[in-house]
Amino acid sequence: MAAQFGRRLRRGATTTAVAAAAVAALSASQAPAAPHPGSAADDRTAAGATPPGDSAATGNSPYYTDLPPLETPDKPGTSVNLPVTGSAEAGIPATVLDAYKKAERDLASTDAACRLPWQLLAAIGKVESGQARGGKVDANGTTLSPILGPALNGQGFALIKDTDGGAYDGDSTHDRAVGPMQFIPSTWATWGQDANGDGRKDPNNVYDAALAAGRYLCAGTRDLSLATDLDRAVLSYNHSTEYLRTVRSWFDYYNRGTHEVPDGTGVLPADTGSGSSTSSPSPTPTQTTPPATSSPTTPPATTEPPATTTPPATTPPPTEPTTPPTTPPPTTPAPGATFGSLENAGTGTLTATAGEAFSERVKVRAKNKLGEPLAKTSVTFTVVGDTDTRFAEGKRTVTLTTGADGTVTAPVLTAGEKTGPLRVTAVAGTTAPRTVSYLGTVTARVADTLVRTDEKALTAAPGTEFAERIKVKAAYKGTGVAETTVTATMITDAETPTANDKGPYFKDALGTPVRILTLKTGADGLLELPKIYADDTAGTYRLRLTTASGATLTVELKVEAPAV
């Protein structure tokens, strides 16, 4: 995973002495000496085998194999808020430590069910890059020089041809692991994050890299408080049981206590060698091919007894895995598929007249944490408010799933008879739900027509009353509109009608003739006008009825002497 640093060991190259020391150290620190039974760590392959391709986050590059000291940084059960004292190995550079803790907070707010502990990021960061080479980062968290792994050219490592044109690793032939968390470019292209808000997703920045690592570890439905899920997460970073043991031992160590040290003063693992800080490593087969060179440095007399006293059988044999460790568990979504945001996908103003369907339909778009469309995301739409507006079949709440473009459109909304404001909410996500709200209004029906309910002629002799009473209906699309104000005005017969001061008239409560009245329709939109009287002047007159919404009806009135 991590860059090659001097005499760094890779899987399959460890000696019996190193293996024995690793088991002893793990036992002393109470870290698991082997993967938990039944966990994904049981990959049924030799610890030194390297799976083909870039199925791991870092292409299974080499990593630091140093284990933490046998002494824990503080006694179990005491405070982890240690001063700058204790074992130097427990010191984590300030900016690097802040990046890990910030990533934990970010994940707690967006994927709380994952329960990512920052100590796991610290353990991986220690194994991958020695905490960014002892905290050699600037004030923004970017490494002072690139941390690059060996070319993944298939010579002792995975074979991964260039995927980034050398943009991140400076190698246009093969990929290399990059940065403090040692992401290969193809993985970073999917999981890269901008955690420090500078507008860039930079694998060389410890804030960006720590958050990206956290999201990668939390992929799918993993709960890292469960040992089996934590094992799967670590193995997805590097498919090696030795790697899992090493990370687990540092995880246990950091859980027992850490303290902050100034940037650049962290302790690098002992197997770094003098050339560990170079930013452009030379081809690395030279450090991985001579396993025999490590054996002379280990006194045989001291290595054989530990090897026999701590056989692998001291831990329960791994059970048959339910999912191959060389690929993420079946529940793990495609990279980047974790839920990111929910947004309005172009919904217009929500307005409707009582009893009618809304012309606009609520539409939202779900995106993953990379800002890309997120399909198969459940979105729940709910109508909120005192109106009786509902979706199809009278439902107040419906749940639908986004399509391939990340969008989903709610069913048609239909307004009831209750008018007033309402709100429609769209909610998606479980651990940290996102909500988009849309305000809407149901308005009362407004009459668009005013018609007579019969077609009887209206005539009267001079000085008498009209025998027929005028009956009209105010309606909206054929449905009667109650409480519609209707103004009745006797008008002249001019091209531009004005109020008439002669001809037919109404009477007020005192019996005084009036030629303008304001009336209201009943519950069914019907209105019967008061009696109309004729004066002594014969002729043809007109009565105009109007509503505030502009509906108009003109009725003809004739005053003539009866036929002899």
Image: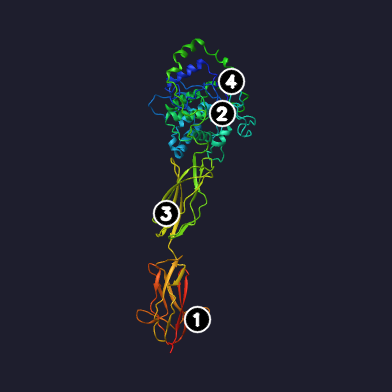
**Horizontal and vertical percent position of residue 133:** 54, 27
Real-space Cα separation, disc 1 to disc 2, in angstroms: 93 Å
- Mark 2 or 3 closer to N-term? 2
Nearer to me, 96 or 63: 63
Quarter of the image for the C terminus: give it. bottom left
Q: Is residue 450 visible?
A: yes
Real-space Cα separation, disc 1 to disc 4, in angstroms: 109 Å
Neighbourhood count class around disc 4 (C-alpha, 10 Å): few under 14, some 14–19, many 20 upward: some
Q: Nearer the viewer, mark 4 or mark 3?
A: 3
- Mark 1 or 2 closer to N-term? 2
Classify residue 164 as left or right of residue 229.
right
**What's the amino acid at mark 4?**
Thr
Neighbourhood count class around disc 3 (C-alpha, 10 Å): few under 14, some 14–19, many 20 upward: many
**What's the amino acid at mark 2?**
Gly
- Mark 4 or 3 closer to N-term? 4
The numbered mark at residue 309 is: none
The numbered mark at residue 493 is: 1
The residue that mark 2 highlights is: 59
Real-space Cα separation, disc 2 to disc 3, in angstroms: 53 Å
Marks 2/3 in contact by CB < 8 Å: the verdict is no
SS state under label 3:
loop
Q: Nearer the viewer, mark 1 or mark 4?
A: 1
Marks 1/4 in contact by CB < 8 Å: the verdict is no
Give the answer, above or below, for where 469 lies relative to 430: below
The residue that mark 3 highlights is: 390
- The residue that appears at 46% across and 11% down in the rendered structure is 305
Residue at the top extreme?
301
**Horizontal and vertical percent position of residue 146:** 59, 30
Give the answer, above or below, for where 366 lies relative to 296: below
Nearer to me, 77 or 20: 20
